[in-house]
Amino acid sequence: MSAGTTSENRDTLSALLERMVLIRKAEERLSKAAQAGELPGAVHLYIGQEASGVGACSQLKDSDWITSTHRGHGHFLAKGGDINAMYAEIWGKRQGICKGMGGSMHVADVSKGILGANGIVGGGFAIATGAAYGAKLRDDGRVSMCFFGDGAANQGVFMETMNVSSVWKLPMVFLCENNRLSEFTVSSTITAGNLVDRAKAFMPTIVVDGNDVLAVREAVGEAVARARGGEGPTYVETGTYRIHGHLEAEDAFLAGGKYRSKEEIEAWQTKERDPISRFETYLTSNGIMDEAAIAAIHARVQQQVDDAVKFAEAGDDADPKLSYTLMFADQEA
Amino acid sequence: MSAGTTSENRDTLSALLERMVLIRKAEERLSKAAQAGELPGAVHLYIGQEASGVGACSQLKDSDWITSTHRGHGHFLAKGGDINAMYAEIWGKRQGICKGMGGSMHVADVSKGILGANGIVGGGFAIATGAAYGAKLRDDGRVSMCFFGDGAANQGVFMETMNVSSVWKLPMVFLCENNRLSEFTVSSTITAGNLVDRAKAFMPTIVVDGNDVLAVREAVGEAVARARGGEGPTYVETGTYRIHGHLEAEDAFLAGGKYRSKEEIEAWQTKERDPISRFETYLTSNGIMDEAAIAAIHARVQQQVDDAVKFAEAGDDADPKLSYTLMFADQEA
Amino acid sequence: MARRRLIQAINDALAEEMERDENIIVLGEDVELAIMGDTRGLLERFGPNRVRNTPICEATLTGMALGATAAGYHVVLHMMFANFVYTGFDAIANQIAKMRLMTGGQMEFPITFLAAYGGGASNAAQHSDSAHPTLMNIGGINVAMPSNSADAKGLLKTALRSRNPCFFLEPASRGGQMGEVPDGEHLVPFGKANVLREGKDVSIVTFGTTVRTSLDAADQLAEQGIEAEVVDLRTLVPLDENAIVATLARTGRMVVVDESRDRGGAGGYIAAIAADKGFKSLKAPVKRVNIPNVAIPYAPIAEREVLPTADKIVAAVTSIVG
Amino acid sequence: MARRRLIQAINDALAEEMERDENIIVLGEDVELAIMGDTRGLLERFGPNRVRNTPICEATLTGMALGATAAGYHVVLHMMFANFVYTGFDAIANQIAKMRLMTGGQMEFPITFLAAYGGGASNAAQHSDSAHPTLMNIGGINVAMPSNSADAKGLLKTALRSRNPCFFLEPASRGGQMGEVPDGEHLVPFGKANVLREGKDVSIVTFGTTVRTSLDAADQLAEQGIEAEVVDLRTLVPLDENAIVATLARTGRMVVVDESRDRGGAGGYIAAIAADKGFKSLKAPVKRVNIPNVAIPYAPIAEREVLPTADKIVAAVTSIVG
Ligand SMILES: Cc1ncc(C[n+]2csc(CCOP(=O)(O)OP(=O)(O)O)c2C)c(N)n1
Ligand SMILES: Cc1ncc(C[n+]2csc(CCOP(=O)(O)OP(=O)(O)O)c2C)c(N)n1
Ligand SMILES: [Mg+2]
Ligand SMILES: [Mg+2]
């Protein structure tokens, strides 16, 4: 990890940490709620991958676009989405960011450039590319970033959109979060070669330690600069790991089956590897923040998460009739 | 061009020439028939690309599989399909290889390993890959070759099937016929980089002069040996050019518009570049065949084509009720 | 009034609306040289930023159309043949048709898809399909199917001014059909059927490619003394259910004609409305004339066998009238 | 008789048929650890050559299934959720459904697709769709939709012994439902409906997820003195039209219940058969209970609103009976 330490810089670094902690605590709380049966639908958690989303989104403005995945809470929060509105959504409430109509796999906030989590693996590629095409035509300086997993990189739309973005020099960033797993399948058993080599035929590429928030930030900074400069797309791959199951309550699906070992998971949870504790060590050992400042962040975030739970729980049930008017603008379904 | 000249070799070379001439004359005759309004549907001709299909299929056995494209007559004949049955099909007759149900874009002969021309651009990738997977499971030594155009290489299934073939080491050959055109679009305007680079992430690649039948034959020989040896897929790209329009009667579609120049076409029709006259020059100047032997091939093939027209014209109209029983095995539609 | 081919009317609508609204952009394979003729001349007139050939990658194109609306564009995506809708179906069925609901109404998708459908030209099974049954079922996408030049122009203009996604399906084998088109601003609203011919004995309810065939059948029936009312639904989504019930109230008998496979096709749905809301008026079985449950064969004689014809319509009508 | 969950019955059918026929292979995303439970234990029993996890690439998987039949395999392709059918739709609709015809009958496609469909678990719009209206319309593919454990086993065995492609659609939210399964060889033929309950006042015609709901409705109706006949169609392709006409002949009234969107849905097609071949018997409007033309919302209260329920069925019945 490396970064100079001016005071502006200190604010930035502190904000990065806070955002990662927010995601971690928000996801942990959702895990608890899921286990307690408090959530109507399934949730796919981002725990362990926080540095990727936070580092990447730290280079984007509100007006830039992202598309996300089924594992979308982290991206939503990293891009500045509101936790209250997200929780209310996941709890199925009217105050949800999507009025309770979409749920965990569809959290979106267009005003923040979040074109939505997506339940279709690979569903974001083309949407992000279209947004980049729109931005290019408008010449509005916006950048479009597509988050996707290593599993999604086997969907053909990956190649199709790399081709389009490259030939039309679109302001795109392909942000591959390589957590080595596709549901209950170890990705290396279904994936040929290195993903980054697929991108090399189309654009510059950067592979980076996805648990190092500053490294991600730096790599994406380059990519975004290229996109804004009209030089076209970049592929950034963040190597990371998902700590929780593919979805909460995974055990019920596995029925005793296994696709990875406890040891493997634990190896990614050490203080040296976990994206948050690792960044905290960096901050303290470089004298950028002290333990107290970090503790204050944790406390503040904890409060924010607790408040969000209250907000969600206190929300009103979704409007059961809303579907009929939401399918079309100004037209009944 | 290079090849030793034993007498076995002479037979092979003569057969290559004859097959190319067959395709050329068969397509020219179809062009005439199309212009005369004698064919019910559209035809997409292979003129100028004969060396690619003939060189490639010369390395395959009847039991090997191919999938073809909308431009499929050349592949059909190169793989040993019967011209009479093909013509009858294109004329819409009961004696057609598909009983008149499929027409030009769907000529197939499963007994010859021809899993069909295909009206869907990119439609053959997955079918060929499935056939290769079946062959691998059966361990029956069969190889599967997917013919596709440079335009089709922008379809995502190209990447998907490269991934599957590579990770499972399937006996596949990806045979890209790069004629630089996708319908009325110059492919370089819609295609990023070099196609071969896309394949490099997955498998060995060979780019070859697609108008040199011996070069194609040699490259595909390597690829097929690799596939049969259990070493997995190879990508072979044959650079070539389509002389006729995307489809016959293209002018009616273009309404005066243009996507290439007369000069460009003519540059590919010179004696040095045309796949057939070029091979003939090679044969004569190396003393492998003389003019008379070549003329005899032309005459024989011309007869064959004329006979095929007669066969097709004399055929019975397709059975109008056949559709009802063909949708399912042993089940009415 | 001007006489225009159906395909020209489409071209006129595109040009006029692109002139009017600079947010309309046209994308698709070979839209620059206009493989179907409907986008002819647009590149020269509006330039490469607004009219652009794409690579062949339908799965991406449909999703890109969605994405580009985020920048405020109305995207016209030409999908060439309706069969290729299937190739690009994920973003249509899983994204565009659902995302407005999934995002709680945060987004709108002004997208107009163009595609030619139907048989009649020996294009064989992979270039002759009718995708409208599938499209009308996925929800969230309008479906317009003009039968003549005037409606083609007026419906397409309505689509291009709408904030909702719409499939505008062109009859593949009828692009050359001539028709009168009103001068000046000509808009045809969605969800309003058109009674093309009045009659008291039976209603022929239809749309798109089979309207002409139905009118021919009505002529033949008139010679036999049977007065058929011919109703052109014009759009399947939204669907003018009132017009179906109303014509049935006038005639008491109905034949539904369309060019889609019977099983789960559009005709069955329209017949079901008759059997429900129009039941009171029903004096005879509701008949369907459409495509049997087959893929379209190539040979002309075999293709003719499976397509709706005036004779088949006449036979269906006479089986329930008198 | 053994009591088995629906998902276990599917698992049993797969295991027994794979034992019987070594040409059956199973492919799909996460079939090894059995994301749905239906392929559980097959890998251990039949080995990696016959049960294999695939990459996530539906467009290729569907086409590969076709290709692998060339080597004589019967391919079971697990597509997980019915929504992902759209992602892999090209090879289904443009290839598998048409290629037997296009090749003049040269090929056969013994392929069994598995996919879970329907709502009820707050899976939201992209994991709750019913694809059967689309699948029944494309032609060339059978569609089986079991409602209980016995039929699940018997229909799947029939599919696995067939030389034709078949979509076997599992009710996503009913995998845990218990039921009796006959011992020994148990096959359920395609195209034969099952009268689950007899009644003289009205016919409830249904299949798949809504059979249980319809039986519940019939119980409620019985308390009001209305005797409903409940007919489970079991397969949509082929469809037992005779059973529809026959039940209508007994009752004169019909409500069609299924879990698909109304517009162009399966219910309309079944109602259309009633309005045609069953017209003579019809004493009242044919009602449809299904999903309004919306994507499935996430919040339970909103999801419940749009799914078929016993109450809605009861209301539809009472609107036409008496
Ligand atoms: C089109 C489609 N196919 C399959 C699925 C089921 N599915 C959900 S997540 C997933 C694995 C995705 O892996 P990856 O892209 O690496 O993301 P990760 O879960 O690791 O974050 C699969 C197969 C889906 N949602 N959509
Ligand atoms: C899925 C699909 N999209 C579009 C088309 C229309 N189309 C037919 S051929 C063609 C161009 C194909 O180019 P290429 O693959 O290079 O083959 P070539 O014609 O050059 O042999 C297109 C766009 C189609 N048939 N199928
Ligand atoms: Mg992953
Ligand atoms: Mg080409």
Image: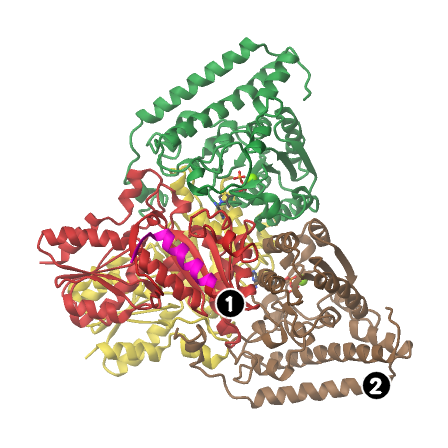
Chain colours: A brown, B green, C red, D yellow
Near-viewer residue (B260 or B122) = B260
The residues tagged by marks 1 and 2 sit, at their Cα atoms, a distance apart of 43 Å
Q: Residues within 10 Å of mark 2 (few under 14, many from 20)?
A: few
Judge depth for marks 1 and 2 and give the one in front. Answer: 2
Asked if disc 1 is less than 8 Å from ligand 1, the answer is yes
Chain ID of residue with mark 2: A
Left or right: residue B106 compared with residue A194 = left
Residue ID for mark 2: A293
Q: Which mark is residue A116?
A: none
Give me the chain letter of mark 1: D
- What residue sits 43% from the left and 68% below the top? C161
Which residues fall within the magenta stretch? C1-19
Quadrant in which the C terminus of chain A is drawn: bottom left
Q: Which mark is residue D127?
A: 1
Is B164 positioned to the left or the right of A222 in the image? Answer: left
Q: Is residue D275 visible?
A: yes
Kindly identify the residue that appears in the image at 43 percent across and 48 percent down.
Answer: C36
- Would you say A17 lies left or right of C173 here? right
